[in-house]
Amino acid sequence: MILMTFWDKIAWLYDFAESMNPKSYKDMLEGVKAVVPDGANVLDCAAGTGELSVAAAKKAGHVLCTDMSLPMLERAKKKSAKKGIKNISFGERDIFSLPDEDNTYDVSMAGNVLHLLEEPEKAVKELCRVTKQGGRVIVPTFMAKNSNPLIKIYTLLGYKAFASYTMESYTKMLKDCGCGPVKVTKISGLVPVAFGVIKVQK
């Protein structure tokens, strides 16, 4: 018997939940497009239904859209096909143990996942490992308070966040990873986002 994770169970609901936080998502997608260079080779981890992958694909040469949840990946595939995007491929990836060699990607991303992890620093360092010198790691993350109505709905369905970041605490966590200069900007919305970008230095 295959154990269904929280993310498997809510894959059908995920895009609807995103639509309840429209400003944050719109600005986050614009932020991704602004950072991704033309023709870049991009890895997107914990991609969910692929919204960041689709945004990156508008400038990238190729995007590898990955997640641990197969139902999420299936929705990402359908979304990219519906939009006629040809430069995205899909695969399972564990953000803590990527099979890719060092210095594989120009840009690596993981959107709205670090606050869910017990060891976010380990995930950040793994993303930096597979990213080239001078490349970018894009890690926007919800600053999710438990009192937020959208978070309350998720919690009833089994959601659990290990951290509730402020701009200051998120910036410190990323800097403490020691991967390179960090820039974090705030994106306002129903659930605000700390939009983190690391310029990888090795």
Image: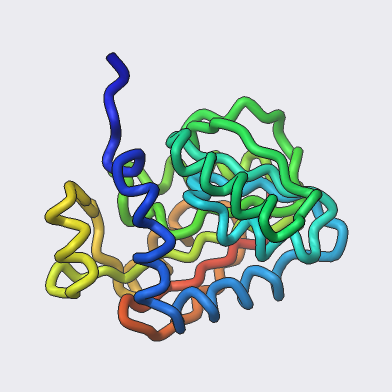
State the count of labels: 0
Residue at 15% in and 65% down? 152
Q: In this view, does 189 lie above or below 202?
A: below
| Residue 70 percent location from the top left of the image | 47, 33
Residue at 39% in and 53% down? 114
| Residue 96 percent location from the top left of the image | 46, 34
Q: Is residue 183 above or below residue 105?
A: below
Asked whether, in this view, residue 32 is left or right of residue 47, the answer is: right
Which quarter of the picture shows residue 19? bottom left
The residue closer to the viewer here, 123 or 191, is 191
Seen as rendered, the residue at the extreme front is 82
Q: Which colour scheme is used?
A: rainbow
- Residue 168 visible, this orientation: yes
| Residue 59 percent location from the top left of the image | 80, 65
Residue at 70% in and 60% down? 83
| Quadrant housing the N terminus | top left
- Residue 167 visible, this orientation: no
Which quarter of the picture shows residue 191? bottom left
The residue closer to the viewer here, 196 or 83, is 83
| Residue 160 percent location from the top left of the image | 20, 50
The residue closer to the viewer here, 33 or 175, is 33
